[in-house]
Image: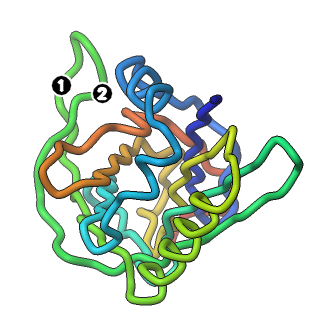
Amino acid sequence: MRVLVVLFLAASLLQAGCASIPLSTAIRLASLEPRTLAQVDASEVRVRVSIPAGYELNVATSSLNLSLHSPTGVKQEGELGLSLLQVTPESRSTGFFTANVPVFTYVLALTPEGVNKLRDIQEFLLSDHINEFKFGVNASLAKIPRNARQITFWADVKLFANEQYFPLINGAKIKFEDGATGS
């Protein structure tokens, strides 16, 4: 089975930047079986997105995305809506020998529609042999500081209430195109 991890930070007029997917996450997801995903209680799924102070997450347009593929070419995709549980000020590391960055961490849960969509995807998981699935977090920005040139962000996922979050993206940087800031 091949597991791919993807994060899409869809902010207006952003272009691709440098992403950092931790090795521990790649190993953990590589060992995650599709049947395990079928056992997830959708009401326990959590997503954390951390962005620097001065930016604001657009929760209404944020989602957890899943894409499943079978060897026969059958595909099931789902954009699972997210709702806000809490926002917490904290700090995150941008790497060795650098100061932590003050951030706001948004803790998100699946919306009722997202819960239902995950359950549909889980039925598909059980009905067909899946050889590949992808996780993605789509998180757009509602507010960008004037004259901002780039954003550093983090995204973590928790599939089971009794587990810790695992980082999907750890301190990735996205550069803004000209004219994208100042909202």
Q: Which residue in the rendered view is the most extreme toward the bottom?
A: 112
Q: Secondary structure at mark 2?
A: loop
Between residue 94 and residue 128, name the one nearer to us.
128
Quadrant hosting residue 104: bottom left
Callout 1: few (<14), some (14-19), or many (20+) C-alpha neighbours within 10 Å?
few
Quadrant hosting residue 153: top left
Q: Quadrant of the N terminus?
A: top right
Residue linked to disc 2: 94
Could you say which disc has been placed on residue 99 in the image?
1
What residue do we see at 59% from left, 52% from top? Answer: 8
Whether pointer 2 and pointer 1 mark residues with C-beta atoms closer than 8 Å, the reply is: yes
Vertical side of 66 occupied by 182: above or below: below
Between residue 183 and residue 173, name the one nearer to us.
173
Query: Which tag is nearer the camera, tag 2 or tag 1?
Result: 2
Q: Amino acid at mark 2?
A: Thr
- Percent across and percent down for residue 135 are 54, 49
Q: Which residue in the rendered view is the most extreme toward the top?
A: 97
- How much space separates mark 2 and mark 1, taking CA atoms? 7 Å
